[in-house]
Amino acid sequence: MSSGHPQQPFSSAGSERRLQELAAALKDQARAQGFEPVGLAALPGDERMPLRHAALERWLEAGHQAGMAWMADPRRRQISSLLPGARSLLAVGLNYHVATNRAPGSLAVARYGWGRDYHRVIDGRLRRLGRWLEEQCPGVGWRACVDSAPLLDKAWAEQAGLGWIGKNGNLIHPRRGSWMLIGHLLTTVDLPGDAPSEPLCGSCSRCLEACPTGAISEPFVVDANRCLAYHTIENRDETLPAAMVAAMGPWVAGCDICQDVCPWNRQPLPSSEDPDLQPRDWLLNLRADEALSWSDADWDERLRGSALRRIKPWMWRRNLRSAQSRTPEAAP
């Protein structure tokens, strides 16, 4: 997350055509940074945004955030609290699907964690876009946001036309599926928005049926209390709940099941060649017996520059022992 110079909304001395040209050029710059898809949303968004805020309130009231208290940050409901005078945002997607799989019998780590820490990757590239925008519009305010910022990031990505929020809570693009990390560049420039995405899940319920713990309690509602990803990454308890251990299978860091079964991810998908997103070999061939012998320093070395550093060494050992107790030989 980064900030530029939050000031008054940028007042263009040019025409609507100039703003359209600036919007197109900004999206071209974003693609040059490796982002695709890219789109713009005008603030405050359409009539769906109040519905998204109401859904967040219901989710919080039901306690579905589990131990993630930061989800209740009030700034998440008011985008201007992140950048005073914000008038539009650029939403960007970064494809993290690579045409490879983990070794047969190895333990499973969610694909988002295979490469470099996406927070650093996306933030650095958004900062470059912000500086470029400031060169075009001196004095403009901007702020880069990754998912660590208190922003309804998927809802705003949907507003910008990057995809729709699926029943599993993930953003889905019709040609790229949901293997997509997202970021946003807020700005005080009044750029024209793109058409929001329309939902295309239809009557499909594969993600609900495939979740081994029933975490997708109803379409579009993911209960973190029952989510393997939450428990393997965020849960700081010494032991995992028995129900999670019984259902976790080979998953020791996150879980991709609801994405693996999604029909939009079963089509031929582009494979990322981005050097920052290529998998670390050991993550594709993770064995409990070997990894349980690693020291804290070993874990520190292997996880350098990784988003998976959020999982502390003792948590890795907890997760490995839990998976090992249920799956002596992990499924392929």
Image (tube, grey):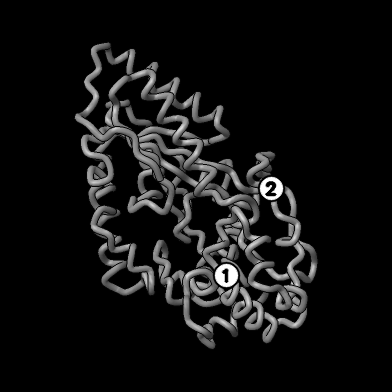
**Which label is found at residue 210?**
1
Q: Position of residue 317 (x, y in %)?
A: 63, 78
Q: Position of residue 235 (x, y in %)?
A: 47, 75
Q: Disc 2 designates what residue? A: 278
Specify few, some or many for label 2: CA neighbours under 10 Å numbering under 14, 14-19, or 20 or more.
Answer: some
Q: Is residue 13 above or below residue 198?
A: above
Q: Answer with the quarter of the image where residue 86 lies.
A: top left
* 329 on left or right of 188: right
Name the kind of residue labelled 2 in the image: Gln
Q: Mark 1 falls on what kind of element?
A: helix
Q: In what element is the residue under mark 2?
A: loop
Q: Choose mark 2 or mark 1, whichever is in front.
A: 2
Q: Quadrant of the N terminus?
A: top left
Amino acid at the residue labelled 1:
Ala
* Count of numbered tags: 2
Residue closer to the observer: 212 or 218: 212
**In the rendered view, would you say 275 is above or below 243?**
above
Q: Residue 331 versus residue 130: which sits nearer the camera?
A: 130
- At 22% from the left edge and 39% from the top edge, which residue is drawn? 84
The reply to whether residue 196 is visible in this rendering is no
Relative side of 71 to 124, left or right:
left
Answer whether labels 2 and 1 touch (C-beta < 8 Å): no
Tell me if residue 119 can be seen.
yes
